[in-house]
Structure formats: structure tokens, C-alpha cells
């Protein structure tokens, strides 16, 4: 099973000036599981809340999808 992530989120470092052209890479944009712009932070990946990327993958697609995502992001 292949899971495609489409996500737009702002990090703490988002300057509010232009979405994908944020000078501090605070606007994170995923399209079809490919990171288009931004820099992933702790809040986006999962800081213990139920709305982090890993938590959502674990809840909706089970542990294999969350582990695959962790493995792919570790290679970045």
C-alpha cells in the first residue's frame, strides 16, 4: 500500500512573507509525498500531540506507514 501525503503547514519560523518563498523556510509544503518547500520542524513531525505527521499516519494507516515515513525522512 502506498500513502501519498499532501500537506501545507506553517512552522514557528514562518515569516508571513510569501508562502513557498519564505526566506526562513517556515512554510512546509508536501505534494504527493514530496517535500516541495520548507523545513520540517518538531511540531510538524510530531511532538507528542495527536496532530503530528507520525501520529496521523499511525492512526489512519497503521505502524508500517509511519515507520516507512520515518525511514524516508531520515534519509533527507
Image (spheres, rainbow, N blue to C red):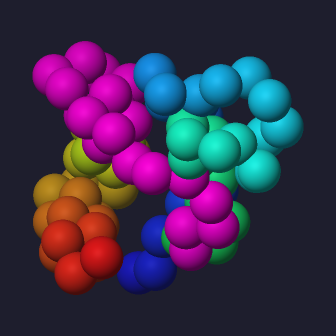
Q: Is residue 52 left or right of residue 64?
A: right
Residue plotted at (83% across, 37% down): 18
Residue plotted at (62% across, 60% down): 37
| 35 drawn magenta | yes
Whole-percent x, y for residue 35 in the image? 55, 67
| One can see residue 59 in this view | no
Whole-percent x, y for residue 53 in the image? 37, 43
Seen in the picture, residue 35 relative to 66 is either above or below; the reply is below
Whole-percent x, y for residue 27 in the image? 63, 40
- Identify the image quadrant of the N terminus: bottom left
Image quadrant of residue 50? top left
The residue most toward the front is 23
Magenta-drawn segment:
34-52
Return the residue nearer the eye: 73 or 32.
73
Image quadrant of residue 24? top right
Residue plotted at (20% across, 64% down): 70
- Identify the image quadrant of the C terminus: bottom left
Seen in the picture, residue 18 relative to 72 is either above or below; the reply is above
Return the residue nearer the eye: 3 or 15.
15
Image quadrant of residue 56? top left
Return the residue nearer the eye: 10 or 50.
10
| One can see residue 20 in this view | yes
| 65 drawn magenta | no
Whole-percent x, y for residue 30 in the image? 61, 59
Amino acid at each position: 500500500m502506498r500513502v501519498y501525503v499532501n500537506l501545507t503547514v506553517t512552522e514557528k519560523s514562518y515569516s508571513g512573507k510569501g508562502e513557498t518563498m519564505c526566506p526562513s523556510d517556515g512554510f512546509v509544503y508536501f505534494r504527493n509525498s514530496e517535500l516541495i518547500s520548507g523545513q520540517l520542524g518538531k511540531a510538524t513531525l510530531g511532538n507528542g500531540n495527536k496532530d503530528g505527521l507520525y501520529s496521523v499516519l499511525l492512526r489512519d494507516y497503521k505502524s508500517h506507514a509511519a515507520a516507512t515515513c520515518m525511514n524516508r525522512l531520515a534519509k533527507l
